[in-house]
Amino acid sequence: MRVLSWLTIAVVVLWAIVPWLFTGHDPLAGVPAEKLQPPGAAHWFGTDAVGRDVFARVVHGSVHSLSGAFTAVGVGLVLGTLLGLLAGAAGGAADEVIMRFADVLLSVPGLLLALTVIILLGPGTVNAAIAVGIASVAAFARLTRAEVVRVRRSDYVEAAFGSGGTFAGVLWRHVLPNSLGPVVALAALQFGAAILAISTLGFLGYGAEPPTPEWGLLISEGRNYLATSWWLTTLPGAVVVAVVLAAGRISKEIR
């Protein structure tokens, strides 16, 4: 299972980097005479309503979904880690204010918060990624703060302060590196959740604009043909599920 998870992520990353090695079909141009063909040797995932190869669109769409997920995790990781580090290290009023802010963010469902942010920013893959990242800031902040408080009370940190270390220096050299293990595991878990959230926003029409081959948009475009052309939604959806499950498994290993 571990090898399969890493293999799944590796294949999808290769799709994003070198998609032409996996398919020779154009993801944007279709052949009307070949529309709505079921999966077969010529078209592994079948074709859509305008004759475009669905597998080619899934492969080329991986760059949008993966880059969006990396952006979302980066936003949540950087902002959340900084807030958690400040709260755990400073304590007092700063800790109270930051943690109450995190509580407010956590009280709002993640998808609803992301929708609120993306309505302010406007639709698009980048804006959707930023919205998902902001929705994950509170989780990173709370976990980082808990780890910083634990490490801050360690003997070697007290010894570093006792030997003349500055507050910022001790935080950078001792507290932060020894607090990042669980945070990195959460980042791996959030990577899968970010792909799912960005695909959801794309399905709802807040992500990439047509005819961009983004995974959530592919599923949305195929829902009108679900009764007769099941592959338009089932196969792209299976890819999303496989990537999310693989990311979750990898996150457990890192933890």
Image: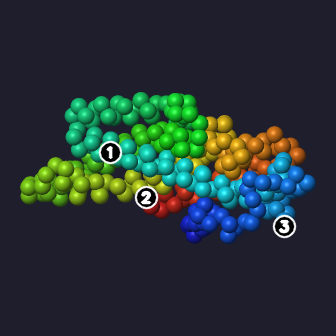
- Position of the N terminus, as image quadrant, is bottom right
| Dot 2 or dot 3, earlier in sequence | 3
Residue type (three-letter) at the residue carrying disc 3: Ala
Disc nearest the viewer among 1 and 2: 1
Q: Position of residue 203 (x, y in %)?
A: 67, 40
Q: Residues within 10 Å of mark 1 (few under 14, many from 20)?
A: some
Secondary structure under tag 3 reads loop
Secondary structure under tag 2 reads loop
Q: Residues within 10 Å of mark 2 (few under 14, many from 20)?
A: few
Residue type (three-letter) at the residue carrying disc 1: Leu
Q: CA distance from mark 1 to mark 3?
A: 51 Å
Q: Residue furthest front?
A: 29
Q: Residue furthest right?
A: 33
Residue at image position (13%, 52%) is 166
The image shows residue 102, relative to residue 164, as above or below, that is above
Q: CA distance from mark 2 to mark 3?
A: 41 Å
The residue labelled by disc 3 is 41
> Is residue 141 or residue 118 the one in the foreground?
118
Q: Position of residue 133 (x, y in %)?
A: 48, 43
Toward which corner of the image does residue 3 lie, by quadrant? bottom right
Q: Report if residue 231 is visible in the image.
A: no
Residue type (three-letter) at the residue carrying disc 2: Arg
| Dot 1 or dot 2, earlier in sequence | 1
The residue labelled by disc 2 is 255
Left or right of 31 on screen, residue 235: left
Toward which corner of the image does residue 141 lie, by quadrant? top left
Disc nearest the viewer among 2 and 3: 3
Residue 92 - label: none
> Is residue 206 or residue 238 the one in the foreground?
206
The residue labelled by disc 1 is 82
